[in-house]
Image: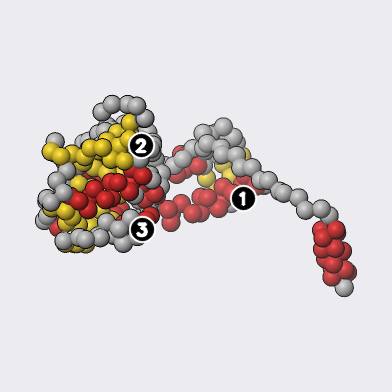
Amino acid sequence: MKKSLLTAFCLALCLALPAQTVRIDWTKESIDGHRTGVVASNASNVEESMGTVKGRTYYAPNGKVFRKGTVRDVARIMLEAQPAMAQVKQVIGYSTENMVRRYPECALYDWYIEELMRATADSTGRKVDIGFANRGGVRIDMPQGEIFYDDIMSMFPFKNNMCYVALKGRDVRVLLDQMAATTFQIIGGIKVVAQNGKIISATVNGEPLDDEKVYGVATLNFLLDGGDGYKVANNALEVIYANGWLYDTMIPYVQSLTAAGKPVEYTNQHWITILKEGDKQ
């Protein structure tokens, strides 16, 4: 009875108070070892990076000992979760630099679209000239240094299929015009110059985009019929779904680079040029 009265009193008090906007701010702290010596671990260095819990005591990497409190309790939860996380924390590659997502184009987008084009051609046996992908499908930047399995899964988390689409040049131009008027997505294999929301030139292999020529386009099934407002398959002469999800291609690609002794690295290919008003091509 007392609990019911207290609840009713609190509710009445809240209703009597003037409405207020509550703002919650979040602070991001890097895992740099400043408190306990804990740093981000991979699948093979958990104890070295995160410490150990023995009995009811947490032994931190920097030598501090916590026999009670939040630090010990959180450490126990994190350490108990590590065996289940071992697969995604495998180191599968190395990046020479932090590849940051930038509009309208960046090294990460160009690295990705080149592999999308290559893998689609390899899977379907078709010649691929152009690549289209949505920027929203790349969710995080490429870290500098060790690349975890989870980094690539988090970068390309959606279950999208790679697709081959045969389009006439005029239909490719429609997609480019849509991007120029709104927001450019990730493109490869075709150099475009835009100004004042319009495409003023587009070339494939150094040749002007031909409205009557059929081009092979690598893309994702998400974009075939309405994803992010694009309908890449509109007027398509042929559509072929490639094998597997996107991350089923990108993870083995990174692993293949590592097996060959190569890091992940790339440079901006300058597929997209946006001129300001008054600029000349």
Q: Residue at x 23, y 57 (%)?
A: 163
* Quarter of the picture holding the N terminus: bottom right
Q: Image quadrant of residue 225? A: bottom left
Residue 14 in the image: x percent, y percent?
A: 82, 58
The colour scheme is secondary structure
N-terminal of the pair, mark 2 or mark 3, is: 2
Label 2 residue SS: loop
State the CA–CA distance, disc 3 to disc 1.
Answer: 44 Å
N-terminal of the pair, mark 1 or mark 2, is: 1
Residue 162 in the image: x percent, y percent?
A: 25, 56
Label 3 residue SS: helix
Q: Nearer the viewer, residue 117 or 192?
A: 192
- Which disc is residue 73 wearing? 1
Residue with the mark numbered 3: 227
Q: Are the residues tagged 2 and 3 within 8 Å (C-beta)?
A: no
Q: Image quadrant of residue 239? A: bottom left
Residue with the mark numbered 2: 196
Q: Residue at x 33, y 31 (%)?
A: 275
Q: Amino acid at mark 3?
A: Gly
Residue 195 in the image: x percent, y percent?
A: 32, 35
Label 1 residue SS: helix
